[in-house]
Amino acid sequence: MNTKTKTPVAVLEPARTPAVKIFGVGSAGVAMLDTANGADFAGAGFIAVNTDAASLASSSAPVKIQLETRLLRGLGTGGDPERGRAIAEEQFTTLKTACEGADVIFLVAGLGGGAGSGISPVLARAAKESGALVLAFVTLPFACEGNRRQQQALSGLDALKSVADGVICLPCQKTFKLIDENTSVLDTFRITDGLLLESVRGVWRLLTRPGLIRIHFDDLCALVRDRHSESVFASVEATGPARAREIVEKLIAHPLLDEGRALAESEAVLVSLVGGRDLTMAEVNRVMEQVGRQCERAQIIMGAAVDESLKGRLSVTIIAAKQGPIPLDLPPVMKTGEADEQVTSRGVMGRSSGRCGSPGAPLTPEQREQNVARNIGGRGRKSNPKMLQAQLPLSIISKGRFDKSEPTIYKGEDLDIPTYIRRGVALN
Amino acid sequence: MFDDSSIVVGLEIGTSKVCAVVGERNPDPAVGSLNIIGLGQARSRGVRKGEIVDPAQAEEDVRNAIVEAEQMADVEIRNVYLGVTGAHIRGFNNRGVHPVVSADREISDDDVQDVVKNAKAINLPTENSVVHAIRQHFFVDGQDGVTNPVGMLGSRLEVDMHVVHGHTNRLQNAIRLVKGLQLEVDEIVSNGLASSLALLTNEQKELGALIIDIGGGTTDYVVYANGVIKHTGVLAVGGDHVSNDLAYGLKVPLSRAEKLKLELGSALVDAECRGQAVTITNELGLPLKTVNVEHLRRIMSLRLEEIFQLVGQDLEQAGLFDYLRGGVFLCGGCARVPQIALLAEQALQMPVSLGQTNSVSGLKSALDQPEFVTAIGLVKFGSFKSRKREGKPSLVSGIKGALSNFLRRP
């Protein structure tokens, strides 16, 4: 939509770019914060929160909050989220003060430990109460880290989902599909941290940088606010003449998207395309068309940007939000636009982010019906995998006299089944 | 009573009926010299979707039909032209090329035979065999539309062939069954081709026409353009499916559905039938069930419309819609459904009419019925064929070549 050159874009920007604070919670969160603490996030406030003094001491974050009580004597929470939660509750006002003044709060944490799982939900609540939009970016532990951590992580995730506006979650186990066997432990953690940061960066850019097709802060708010849902994301890149197709193939095969299933199950999808100057509208169109086909039910928000450093490459970041536990109504936000040849010389611009979840406003009966219909009738798409079975046709359509004969399959349709049933024509 | 060689019999083993038509060739080879003198039919019980599934039943039905036809025509039937159909039958176009090597560059008969042979050298799956190889047009040095290149000058001769092929074993099933009745199968003919022969005049073939033969188990369609067959297809959907849909949708037995289809069926859902209901009764006159006529017609209409849409899609893919200046002709049992031509017009966006057999005389009762078109076409095919044989006995061996020849003749 914005097809202006750099200067007009600046004029179009909201008078105030949203103030963003990034919190790293727990040892893993603090470590990720350090990685992130760079030029990419100029303007954001970095705050490290932990119970462990040693971890905080090594952090480069400008603001550090050590949640300490006599109980802990400067040690960690001992891997107990309850303890983490108790301490955080005790220091609730401190946390809230730290959150003050931000429009958006990014919460980066590794769930599973005491601090990450225990403090994050409390911090999210504090942030919420201070009036900010809370987006949590969390990792789930590797399976080898043990059952207990896994369970703690999941309950932490649930707690977080119920308070944060949006949660983008990276199960580390899934990254095994992305790395080869010889990757060292250090590298593995760096990769998972990098992946998570990639999504933080995506949302960050989305909020702060102009793109050809912009996704505005208020769109994101409208989508994310009070949805309480969980998101998955993926970032892929391709080059060459067939890059649009390649991108789509990679996306569909992406392990983090459950081979495309996550897209089908998602409620809202945010797609951000970044290409060099040679990015064509046809490519944008092809990618969006395919993504749209993958997630027919989802609300799609797209952004596109040109980054000169991406000569010949096309990079797509996709964030897909599953439906939250509570039925939601979709805000009528839909951003589309046409790309022109606007170019800005800043780094990578609009990346994408997306997500959505649950209802802010009470549902009208119609909407509820729609939600139900979505759940029941959605072709192969379900927000809750456990409900998948409900999709199987309950009544087997008898083919009458053609039961035993060779079926007449024409372009994937069994023509022996009455036409009116296949076309869903209701006879009342 | 009759000279044996003038008798031609067409046998169609259809899904709903077995039909044998006896024709007599008039020695005078004028147009319309074919006279239908006998017709025998029997309800078919061993066929589904155009293919035999119960040989014993089918054999009995064929025997009954043949006997009836023999009685009516007062002849003994020894040879038949057998119609074949089924989803396994496919058609495609193939081109053969042959360089003309003679010193004076004049195209000879041999050249023509060679190029035809080349065009027939096709890569088929091993289990398939060719039913027809029908010559379309020749190209002489790229010049299009040459119908007979003998005597022309050129260096490169090409020919387009339309090849219809099918699954050998399934074709053999029908042939073996007929042979089991001590009948000779002169040739097998695809049903669509036979129907088109019975319906189209040369002028219509020249203009371009689409024949849709909606039978009991299959829908056969053939496209003529510029006087030659351009496209053939078989869809294993037919009147049986309509009945089956009705039985399912109205929750009545199949036999009742069949009856309702004949009594109340229509291809279009018109305003009058809205809310109209019919009570069906058992043999004692007691009411059994009330059937909503609107639903009945809606179910029928959707199924028939789908058939036309599928045919339309296929033609669109083949890019043949623009060639059909002669229009669309319907035949087969389903052509009896009221308003089907209107429905087809809506679905195909082209003028549609019910086909009329032409240049055949004889039994009025047979000639007017759309369901006998295929069998009559088989007789017509046979009459061309045997006339050909008489005319050029030396060519008897080249049966397929002769077939292509006859197609260019009335």
Image (tube, coloured by chain):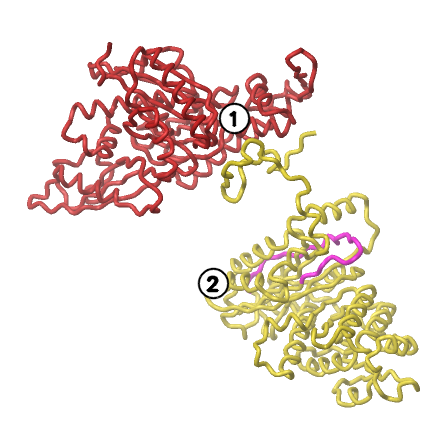
Establish if A164 lies above or below B121. Answer: below
- Closer-to-camera residue (A77/B25): B25
Q: Disc 2: which chain?
A: A
Amino acid under disc 2: Ala
- Closer-to-camera residue (B125/A98): B125
The chain displayed red equals B
The tint chain A carries is yellow
Question: Is residue B336 within the magenta segment?
Answer: no
**Residue that carries the numbered disc 1 in the rendered image:** B343
- Disc 2 versus disc 1: distance between alpha carbons? 44 Å
Question: Is residue A326 within the magenta segment?
Answer: yes
Amino acid under disc 1: Leu
Q: Secondary structure at mark 2?
A: loop
Query: Residue at (17%, 36%) from the top-left corner?
Result: B149
Would you say the magenta stretch is mainly helix, strand or loop?
loop
**Residue that carries the numbered disc 2 in the rendered image:** A242
Give residue B127's position: percent from left, percent from top: 35, 44
Relative side of A343 to A34, left or right: left
Q: Residues within 10 Å of mark 1 (few under 14, many from 20)?
A: many
Q: Mark 2 and 1 residues: CB-CB less than 8 Å, in contact? A: no
Query: Residue at (60%, 71%) from the top-left corner?
Result: A177
Residue B17's image quarter?
A: top left
- Closer-to-camera residue (A361/A156): A156
Q: Residues within 10 Å of mark 2 (few under 14, many from 20)?
A: few
Can you say which quadrant of the picture contains the N terminus of chain A? Answer: bottom right
Residue A97 visible to the viewer: no
Give residue A39's position: percent from left, percent from top: 66, 81
Residue A261 visible to the viewer: yes
Residue B399's image quarter?
A: top left
